[in-house]
Image (cartoon, rainbow, N blue to C red):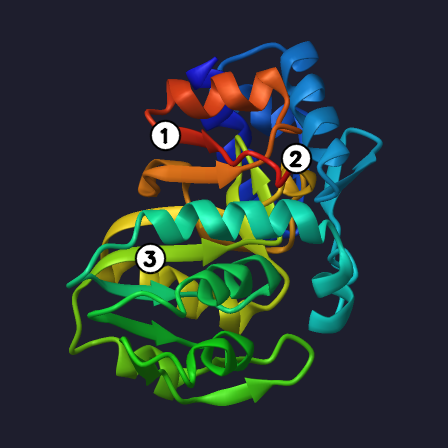
Amino acid sequence: MRNTRQRRQQITQMLVEQGSVQVSDLVERFGVSSVTIRADLTHIESQGLATRTHGGATLVRTPPQEQDIHQKDALNLPLKESIGAYAARLVKPGDNIIIDSGSTTMTLARHLREHSDVTVMTNGLNVAWELANAPGVELLLTGGLLHKQSLSLHGSQAEASLGSYSFDTLFLGVDGLDLQFGLTTHQEAEASLNHRMVERARRVVVLTDASKFGRVSLHRIARLDQIHAIITDEGISSDYREGLQRLGIEVIIAEPPP
């Protein structure tokens, strides 16, 4: 299973770098049969990253359509609330945390309003708004360029602002999570900033409802071996739950509200 996962990840990376791949070249490179390579390409195609062609595959240049933050807020809201509430229980007095922008991470911020002695850095204007009047939360913003569709800050200024800090935990939102390709998002600049966040945190916790499993957006944030825990809902499939646990990732199921 691990060899298959690693091979498919390498093939996907080749697609991103080269734009296309050929079955014959992949057979020679990986020392496996053409039947195995075709199965790999079919799997990658099913993730929305490639289109099969005669003798190979080409990269899908158009990522899945991004929804704006208001559309995202309305999707799976009860599940997101339970995920945010559980994540808030992991935050203790004295913690220094990063909260990524996003609709699920915003629910975490909402549940932190009554916390005390917590420092939060965020690149999300919606997250900052939720915590603006929280007396026990010291709030830091990354700065940077505003992506209006997601209300998130990004760019070189945002990335540079992280350089002077070390955080206990990063609470990260994603647009897609795939066992082979890892964590992904729609925007290249947001992926770059999220990758920097991962580097600055001692623990990385992904907040996502189960609808994101099996989805792949064009820009990778991080490999799955770079994260420590995932908080999700009971809609996660057994394949994904077992696959994540095999990687040593703690899978936490947030109970839905009564």
The amino acid sitting under disc 3 is Leu
Q: Which numbered disc, 3 or 2, marks the residue that appears first in the sequence?
A: 3
What separation in Å lies between label 1 and label 2 (alpha carbons)? 16 Å
| Residue found at x 61% / y 63% | 103
Q: Is residue 248 above or below residue 173?
A: above
Q: CA distance from mark 1 to mark 3?
A: 15 Å
Q: Nearer the viewer, residue 217 or 31?
A: 217
Q: Position of residue 142 (x, y in %)?
A: 36, 83
Residue under label 3? 170
* Count of marks overlaid on the render: 3
Question: In whole angstroms, how far apart are the C-alphas of marks 3 and 2?
Answer: 22 Å
Q: In this view of the protein, can residue 17 be seen by the observer?
A: no
Q: Residue at x 50, y 52 (%)?
A: 84
Amino acid beneath label 2: Gly
What residue is shown at x 74% (from left), y 44% (from top)?
58
Q: Tag 2: Cα neighbours inside 10 Å, few (<14), some, or many (≥20)?
A: some
Residue 249's tag is 1
Under circle 3, the secondary element is: strand
**Which residue, given by chain and number where applicable, does mark 2 sit on?**
214
Question: Vertical placement of 166 versus 209: above or below?
Answer: below
